[in-house]
């Protein structure tokens, strides 16, 4: 690990969990109170399984103190942008979710106040109550100093392209803060083929489900209604940067043919929204070829560093991004200044 880069390493997709919500997850699992197959698989493993990996991650998720700071120091990470881990509050009923989001944001703000040079954060919100979610985002940004919203993809099978959620998009645009769409396991309507071969989580299901969510937002016309909205995707864009040509070709053909009543004519190409409204991070993808590809096709000003702590806490991976064949200013943009601009650090 290099110690003299001349700029900060800001990690932009780093997870935490409050003890309150962790207990609520475990209680929900213990009483078999959720019919969400993905939640039972994902959170059941990380909160209830006793493997070395799951117990280490569970402990690190709930630590916003010295252990996390020591891990950051060991990997040369100067700042973590913290967000409530998937599925956040989105698994609960609306009233419970609204309360948990508020308390999680208060706890996050307290941790940031204790370590103001090491942490920043994104506000948890409850899409189950869109108006309350918009108000909590406003409180999080204006009162607590948080830097945007974290939404852990689908909310009980529903997506942000549905107009009933557009109060959230309007609030983010008005506040000029990004929405980070973090993966969730696929909803019940699509999970079974993934689960049958253990592909429902980060190995593949996350990318498919979250990439789908992003595309639903684009093709719905939501970004024509909210043209200044900023959305962040992790994991090098959940595969979407590799599909730009085909997305433009096939979506354009379907719209011209008026094949689907649910697909309005857009003001821009699909690829243009993905280049102009979206930002991307390297979370979990410390691999030089696709990093350089995403920089090439989406723009050097669109890609930011992330580790995906603590789920992918591999200290030596920082060596990969330290060694990227970039000039000083582009390397600084990747690690520091893009994040400072997007999240207003």
Image: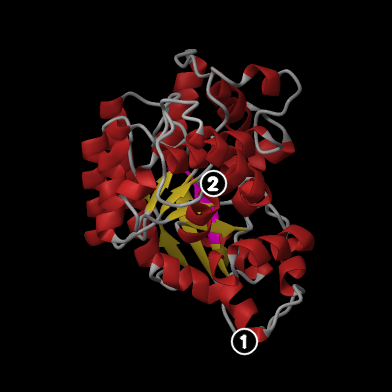
- Is residue 4 depicted above or below 224 in this figure? below
- Is residue 22 depicted above or below 243 in this figure? above
Q: Return the residue nearer the eye: 77 or 220.
A: 220
Residue for point 60% across, 60% down: 306
**Residue 312 as seen in the image, left or right of residue 216:** right
On whether residue 16 falls in the magenta region, the answer is yes
Q: Between marks 1 and 2, how big is the CA–CA gap?
A: 30 Å
Q: State the predominant SS element of the stretch in magenta.
A: strand
Residue for point 62% across, 35% down: 208
The residue where tag 1 is placed is 6
Q: Which residues are magenta?
A: 12-18
- Is residue 123 depicted above or below 250 in this figure? below
In the structure shown, which secondary structural element does the residue marked by tag 1 occupy? Answer: loop
Residue 132 picture location, percent across and down:
22, 38
Mark earlier in primary sequence (1, 2): 1
The residue where tag 2 is placed is 61
């Amino acid at each position: 690990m290099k110690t003299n880069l001349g700029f900060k390493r800001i990690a932009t997709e780093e997870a935490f969990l409050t003890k309150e919500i962790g207990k609520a997850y475990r209680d929900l699992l213990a009483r078999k109170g959720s019919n969400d197959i993905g939640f039972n698989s994902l959170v059941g493993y990380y909160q209830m399984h006793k493997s070395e990996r799951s117990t280490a991650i569970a402990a690190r998720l709930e630590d916003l103190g010295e252990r996390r700071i020591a891990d950051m120091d060991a990997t040369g990470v100067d700042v973590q942008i913290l967000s409530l881990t998937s599925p956040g509050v989105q698994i609960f009923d609306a009233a419970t979710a609204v309360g948990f989001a508020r308390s999680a944001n208060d706890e996050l703000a307290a941790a940031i106040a204790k370590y103001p040079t090491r942490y920043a954060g994104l506000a948890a919100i409850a899409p189950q109550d869109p108006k309350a979610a918009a108000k909590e985002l406003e409180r999080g940004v204006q009162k607590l100093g948080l830097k945007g919203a974290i939404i852990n993809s689908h909310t009980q099978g529903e997506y942000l392209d549905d107009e009933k959620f557009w109060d959230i998009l309007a609030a983010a645009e008005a506040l000029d803060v990004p929405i980070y769409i973090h993966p969730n396991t696929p909803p019940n309507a699509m999970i079974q083929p993934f689960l049958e071969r253990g592909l429902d989580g980060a190995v593949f299901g996350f990318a498919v489900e979250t990439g789908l969510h992003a595309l639903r937002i684009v093709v719905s016309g939501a970004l024509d209604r909210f043209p200044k909205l900023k959305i962040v995707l992790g994991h090098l864009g959940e595969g979407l940067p590799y599909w730009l040509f085909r997305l433009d070709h096939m979506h354009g053909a379907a719209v011209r043919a008026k094949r689907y009543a649910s697909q309005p004519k857009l003001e821009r190409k699909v690829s243009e929204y993905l280049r102009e409204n979206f930002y991307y991070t390297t979370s979990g993808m410390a691999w030089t070829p696709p990093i350089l590809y995403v920089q090439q096709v989406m723009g050097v000003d669109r890609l930011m560093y992330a580790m995906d702590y603590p789920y992918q806490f591999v200290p030596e991976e920082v060596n990969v991004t330290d060694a990227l064949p970039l000039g000083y200013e582009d390397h600084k943009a990747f690690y520091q200044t893009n994040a400072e601009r997007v999240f207003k650090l």
